[in-house]
Image (tube, helix red, strand yellow):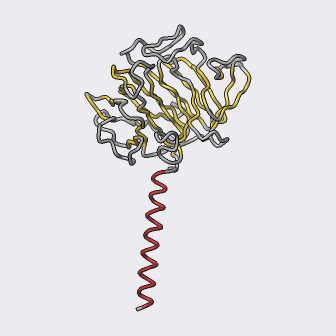
Amino acid sequence: MIKRFLDLLFFFLLGILLNETILAQDQTDQEPQTVTETLELFNGQDLSGWYPFLKGRQPGEDPNGVFSVQDGLIRVSGEEFGCITTNNAFENYRIILEFKWGEKTCLGRELKARDSGLLIHSVGKDGAFGGSWKYSIECNIIEGGLGDFIVVGNQSDDYSISANAAPEKVEGCFVWQKDGQPQTINAGRINWFGRDPDWKDIKDFRGRNDLDRPHGDWNKIELIAQNDKIDIYVNDILVNQCFNAKPSAGQIQIQSEGAEIFFRRITLLPLEN
């Protein structure tokens, strides 16, 4: 009788341990896969391959439909802070994303620049950063700052990037310059090369050098992630580069950050294509 009790207790405790291990794996890191063929991350019909995470909610919960598919497009309403995250992690790839802004703004950003982001190399726990996002490297999608790098981390050396930068900062941030001096950050931004020094956080802001198309038109972002290097192209023009990216692989997130935004294409391609 005692032996049977001990056997049952062992299997009960083992079950708890395995369950906690599985949950921990679900919430943290996935084994990255090298992209060897074209992968369409959006099939035009639903959000297969992604899961939502919204601030203050559990992974997979989206009762208000912040993320939806309408007329063959991904619509992000912006009404809650959070993201959709790929189920799988990736390394060594090109990603092409096409987006346009909607009209609605919210979450205290009604009169501020429309804001979102493409976060790659995402690792760790959902909501680790600000309760909304995994730690990651962000390609900023914001009016006036399309193509800025942002380190979404905990200000440790585990999350950082280096880039060649111009001698002078803009808004206290380094600005990418192809022949500049190497600089490393573990928080904040490295601005794209043409960011307007007079940028203001206002709706419909447009800088003198901005490459994004007029509001309501489609824009193309392409990132090339090769080992620890990342190149950002906006409408086919190289706007930013970094190296020594930490981490250098992980899941992909698309932000909800107070502005309505639509996506019609999210494609992963092998580096050689």
State the quadrant of the N terminus.
Answer: bottom left
Coordinates of residue 261 in the picture (x, y in percent): 37, 25
**Count of number-bearing discs:** 0
| Residue that extends furthest to the front in the rendered view of this protein | 108
Q: Quadrant of residue 53?
A: top left
Vertical placement of residue 16 versus 156, above or below? below
| Residue that extends furthest to the top in the rendered view of this protein | 208
Q: Which of the two residues, 158 or 198, is positioned nearer the viewer here?
A: 198
In the image, taking residue 253 as reference, residue 229 lies left or right, namely: right
Could you tell me which residue is drawn at 46 percent across and 13 percent down? 205
Vertical placement of residue 163 versus 235, above or below? below
Coordinates of residue 189 in the picture (x, y in percent): 60, 27
Coordinates of residue 109 in the picture (x, y in percent): 42, 24
Could you tell me which residue is drawn at 44 percent across and 79 percent down? 9
Vertical placement of residue 269 versus 251, above or below? above
In the image, taking residue 69 as reference, residue 126 lies left or right, namely: right
Could you tell me which residue is drawn at 45 percent across and 28 percent down? 116
| Residue that extends furthest to the left in the rendered view of this protein | 71
Q: Which of the two residues, 81 or 89, is positioned nearer the viewer here?
A: 81
Q: Quadrant of residue 64?
A: top left
Coordinates of residue 65 in the picture (x, y in percent): 30, 37
